Amino acid sequence: MKTIGHWVDGAEVSSTSGRTAPVYNPATGEQTGEVVLADLQEAAQAIASAKQAAAGWRTASLSRRAEVLFSFRQLLHDHADELAAIVTAEHGKVLADAGGELARGLENVEFATGVSHLLKGGFSEQAATDVDVYSIRQPLGVVAGITPFNFPVMVPLWMCANAIAAGNAFILKPSEKDPSASLLLAKLWQQAGLPDGVFTVLQGDKVAVDAILESPDIAAVSFVGSTPIAKYIYETGTRNGKRVQALGGAKNHMVVLPDADIEMAADAAVSAAYGAAGERCMAISVVLAVGDAGDRLTDAIAKRLPALVIGDGATPGTDMGPLISAEHRDKVAGYIGQGADAGATVVTDGRSAVVPENGFFLGTTLLDHVTPEMTVYQEEIFGPVLCVVRAETYEEAVALINANQYANGTAIYTRDGGAARRFQYDVEVGMVGINVPIPVPVSYYSFGGWKASLFGDTHMYGPEGLAFYTRGKVVTSRWPDPATSEVDLGFPRTR
Ligand code: NAD
């Protein structure tokens, strides 16, 4: 059984903390490794190494940084299959989905290769007589990223590409459930020519996270995970004087208007609800069927479910893999019972699906006639359970979305451009899809929800990500003839 260590100063290092966590292959249920869990001393060593590296990396020219990013991009391409296999083996998602995760992560590296252009400041000649003013953006120093289990490659790439391009050292604290991909990322950064210590992996749990949040040497923390932890990270990190962007959980609604192409909407709902076994922060977990769309849509979704192949994600032809752990599988299964008890119609029951015996599998579940006071509606299930809520009108549908505590993503299916335009304007959600079920923005926009789906004011990656990892400085400059100098106690004017 392998031991998964930290990555500090350009090498994998073991731990002396005496604490580890098991890592499973969710498709077989077998423990395949154990990840070390940092103690305070190990966290301090990792942070000290990053601090030292940050001072040097800051001086690297923009062209040099871009060169490293271009190499890193190529290496990610070259190791795409290996990375996908690692993700599938520890997360469970099917290989094609793991490849998709890498592809969307890669976009962020590609964005960051443009660092020379992206970090250009402004320049105003003659802002006052013989005075020029210009702005520059400088790195923060050491920044950290704390990531969830559901995207062990993509979410770290959301963060580290921009953080490193901006001249910072980056410490990744991956999820302890699928930590191996982080070490391959570290090796690829090193092969790309990144100086040792600029990318660090600190494996661990709350102890490592708290060490990051308490450290005076870490300037900023990016977090992606569940809402209660996101809130904790935001409150603790900001109390300690750090910049924090903390992305939380979700309950993404897909509105289907009666004029929508129901077959197309059903395809989208099934893909977005059950892909990655529903363990995506942008998964559709609620379909809001408006007017007479309800019966047609529920039938069309239900009709598609028996065809989905559930099994080991590493086996070609599999559509849906297992859940991350036995506990999580049981928790999700519990929601199905709660939904039924509360009066929802269980159209398809994932608990009775024929699934591989070993491993953390659960079939697909479709709950119809779900109502807003039900727990299955209110809580993030994070599994292959799709709830259909009926709404009489468009207004009722939008009011429901806007009343929800979560506001990560949402989508509308319609052929009416005016309705879609109105939805985009009305809905209080950070990312909106129009006939697009999973509207994850491309890397040159930024990713983020509203309300309990994001704590902080900067969205992740893209222009906002780069702004998050840098701080602005404005320089006012003049080169007067000393002979003209005199004492003037007046406040400087520009005209
Ligand atoms: P999680 O909150 O349990 O864990 C996320 C990270 O926080 C991990 O690195 C974990 O080690 C750490 N952590 C866990 N408990 C902690 C504690 N008590 N104190 C300090 N640190 C702690 O989330 P998860 O189960 O890994 O991921 C699933 C969740 O992430 C879902 O809620 C999902 O919606 C959310 N998510 C959100 C987005 C988004 O963009 N908004 C993206 C992906 C996942």
Image (cartoon, helix red, strand yellow):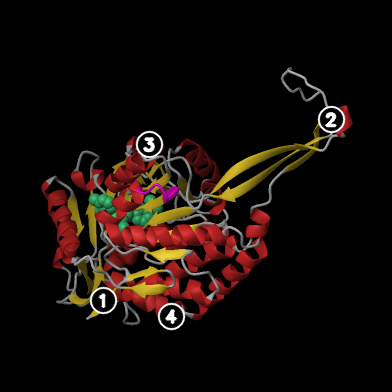
The amino acid sitting under disc 1 is Thr
* Secondary structure found at label 1: strand
Q: Residue 152, percent across and down?
A: 37, 65
Q: Is residue 398 visible?
A: yes
The magenta span reads: 215-221
Of 270 and 83, which appears nearest the observer?
83
Marking on residue 3: 1
Of 150 and 167, which appears nearest the observer?
167
* Secondary structure found at label 4: helix
1 or 3: tag closer to the N-terminus: 1
Of marks 1 and 4, the one in the foreground: 1
At label 4, counting other C-alpha atoms closer than 10 Å, the crowd grade (few under 14, some 14-19, many 20 or more) is some
Ligand 1 shown in quarter: bottom left
Q: Residue at x 60, y 43 (%)?
A: 472
The amino acid sitting under disc 4 is Asp
At label 1, counting other C-alpha atoms closer than 10 Å, the crowd grade (few under 14, some 14-19, many 20 or more) is some
The amino acid sitting under disc 2 is Thr
Q: Residue 119, percent across and down?
A: 64, 52
Q: Looking at the image, do the residues carrying marks 3 and 4 touch, with CB atoms under 8 Å apart?
A: no
Task: Give the CA distance from mark 1 to mark 4.
Answer: 22 Å
Magenta stretch secondary structure, dominant: loop
Which residue matches tag 3? 402
Which residue matches tag 4? 81
Marking on residue 129: 2
